[in-house]
Image (tube, rainbow, N blue to C red):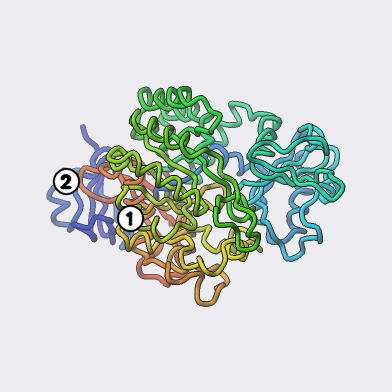
């Protein structure tokens, strides 16, 4: 017999253009059976249906994060928490406290330190600064946005990096005037470090994933879309699902690099697509990287950087090889995501998508990050059928990485500033937009990103007029990008993203209405309840 629950006496924001507001909703098993007025919904419910009083609270579709690295994020919860550090002294204090509390940790790993602190010593990040705190064990810190790393001397030694080590292709070992490595590594220069760090046990990884899943549910998420580096977690997620413990849906991707065996990547994702339940584990994506990030001068900017005109950044693929790989992957029926931040990378991605014509319009290829497209490329998103995937918490990232908020403008220059993270311009052109976080790069809380997309201003109200305020969007547009827009970006819009009859019963109840509170207060709204597939996944006990 079907289980029916009638949610009544609420303020339901459906994100369904044909029926945007409702008083009540009927859930039958894992699907929505009716949405609308109390009398309409009651007429569709059985006499003995359970009735849940929403007490006039605001309810809406659960959030969908369109860009995460979930396994890495689950590990972040057990690493040195550097994103929260607001000073350089705090970074070292966190390292000291962590190392003293975990004397048996063979490696000390942390992520998301800022590129700039008010008390950063002259000469910047250097191995000696870490050595002063921990010298007997390797220390490996990934930077904010994870395109550079900071190592102590012991980590450099174990990695075999010396003054005689050549720069790897696509990476740089930063050296001092004498040629000695400083401990600062860019892009692929530090990728080998990941293989040296002791692997997490299966039991510990499973526990970390479950903890991260509950954290995502606490913040109102019903689905996360993997942007890669989650391959190792897939068997465990399948096991968690088989044990009926999975309360978060996943879109799964695997990364294809220029030196990858593309056949193997396709076979891996094909296995996920054919063997897993797509409602919870949807294997459909192959991810590409074209460049790095602007802050470390590794985003691909063929025109040069404003502060270093002779530098053009990094382009990781040869254009024809990349276009051929895109066509092959789309022909096999997979969706393509491409990390493309710099102007040249975005253009190269859209060129490859355009060359695949109708197939691209069917597959909805995505441009991840899309920080500085040309005006021409903003218009091309619609014609090609490409999705612009943004992480709005990164817009003027003062709250995420203290001291980094001025770096982006210094790299790009004021002449191009009007197209910085051009969410509004792409929406006005008729393009499709999805929001996510890139967790653990930034806070996984969707409400933080929604506030930032609306105000483009830090929590301490900087800049006073907003950063590139002409690219601000409305709260309704931001909510759409985190719900139905994100569902559309993953081919899930017929089942997820809005409260409509026949869709999965994935919804949240909030402490306040984000459409009515002052936008500055949106990030303070609490998720009181998260329901995934009709089952409670999170409930605030105080509520």
Q: Quadrant of the N terminus?
A: top left
- Residue at image location 50% in from the left, 32% down from the top: 256
Front position among marks 1 and 2: 1
Where's residue 392, x and y in %?
A: 47, 58
- Residue at image location 39% in from the left, 66% down from the top: 473
State the image quarter where residue 480 is shown: bottom left
Q: Estimate the spatial distance between the alpha carbons at disc 1 and disc 2, rounded to whole Å.
A: 39 Å
Placement of 360 over or under 329, stated as above or below:
below
The label on residue 45 is: 2
The label on residue 489 is: none
Q: Secondary structure at mark 2?
A: loop
Q: Secondary structure at mark 1?
A: loop
State the residue in front, 159 or 240.
159
- Residue at image location 40% in from the left, 41% down from the top: 352
Q: Residues within 10 Å of mark 2 (few under 14, many from 20)?
A: many
Placement of 316 over or under 403, stated as above or below:
above
Where's residue 411, x and y in %?
A: 60, 61
Placement of 41 over or under 524, stated as above or below:
above
State the residue in front, 491 or 58.
491
Where's residue 393, x and y in %?
A: 51, 58
State the image quarter where residue 164 is shown: top right
The label on residue 431 is: 1
Q: Is residue 94 visible?
A: yes
Q: Is residue 538 visible?
A: no
Placement of 480 over or under 243, stated as above or below:
below
Q: Residues within 10 Å of mark 1 (few under 14, many from 20)?
A: many
């Amino acid at each position: 017999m079907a289980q029916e629950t009638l949610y009544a006496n609420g303020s339901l924001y459906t994100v369904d253009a044909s029926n945007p507001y409702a008083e009540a909703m009927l859930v039958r098993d894992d699907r929505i059976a009716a949405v609308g007025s109390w009398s309409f919904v009651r007429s569709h419910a059985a006499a003995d249906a359970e009735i849940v009083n929403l007490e006039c609270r605001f309810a809406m579709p659960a959030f969908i994060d369109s860009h995460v690295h979930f396994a890495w994020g689950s590990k972040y919860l057990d690493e040195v928490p550097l994103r929260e550090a607001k000073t350089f002294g705090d970074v070292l204090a966190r390292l000291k406290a962590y190392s003293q509390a975990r004397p048996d940790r063979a490696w000390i790993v942390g992520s998301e330190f800022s590129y700039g602190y008010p008390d950063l010593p002259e000469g910047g990040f250097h191995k000696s600064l870490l050595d002063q705190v921990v010298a007997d064990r390797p220390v490996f810190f990934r930077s904010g946005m994870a395109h550079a790393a900071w190592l102590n001397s012991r980590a450099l030694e174990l990695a075999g990096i010396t003054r005689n080590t050549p720069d790897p292709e696509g990476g740089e070992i930063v050296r001092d005037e004498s040629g000695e490595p400083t401990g600062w590594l860019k892009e692929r220069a530090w990728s080998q470090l990941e293989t040296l760090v002791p692997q997490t046990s299966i039991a510990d990884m499973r526990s970390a994933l479950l903890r991260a899943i509950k954290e995502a549910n606490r913040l109102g998420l019903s689905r996360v879309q993997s942007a890669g580096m989650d391959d190792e977690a897939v068997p465990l997620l399948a096991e968690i699902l088989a044990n009926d413990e999975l309360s978060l849906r996943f879109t799964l991707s695997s990364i294809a690099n220029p030196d990858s065996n593309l056949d193997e990547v396709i076979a891996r994702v094909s296995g996920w697509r054919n063997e897993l339940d797509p409602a919870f584990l949807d294997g459909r994506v192959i991810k590409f990287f074209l460049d790095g990030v602007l802050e470390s001068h590794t985003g691909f900017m063929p025109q040069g950087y404003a502060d270093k005109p002779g530098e053009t950044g990094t382009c990781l693929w040869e254009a024809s090889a990349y276009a051929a790989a895109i066509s092959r992957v789309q022909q096999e029926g997979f969706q393509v995501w491409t990390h493309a931040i710099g102007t040249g990378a975005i253009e190269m991605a859209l060129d490859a998508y355009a060359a695949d014509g109708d197939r691209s319009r069917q597959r909805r290829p995505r441009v991840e990050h899309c920080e500085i497209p040309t005006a021409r490329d903003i218009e091309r998103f619609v014609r090609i059928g490409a999705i612009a995937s943004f992480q709005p918490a990164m817009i003027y990232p003062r709250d995420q990485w203290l001291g980094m908020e001025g770096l982006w403008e210094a790299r790009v220059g004021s002449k191009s500033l009007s197209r910085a993270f051009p969410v509004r311009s792409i929406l006005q052109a008729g393009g499709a937009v999805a929001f996510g976080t890139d967790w653990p790069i930034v806070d996984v809380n969707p409400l933080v990103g929604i506030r930032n997309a609306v105000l483009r201003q830090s929590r301490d109200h900087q800049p006073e007029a907003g950063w590139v305020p002409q690219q601000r969007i409305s709260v309704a547009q931001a909510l759409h990008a985190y719900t139905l827009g994100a569902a559309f970006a993953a081919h899930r819009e017929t089942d997820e993203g809005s409260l409509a009859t026949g869709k999965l019963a994935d919804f949240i109840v909030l402490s306040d209405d984000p459409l009515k509170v002052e936008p500055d207060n949106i990030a303070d709204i609490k998720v009181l309840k998260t329901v995934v597939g009709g089952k409670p996944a999170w409930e605030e006990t105080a509520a």
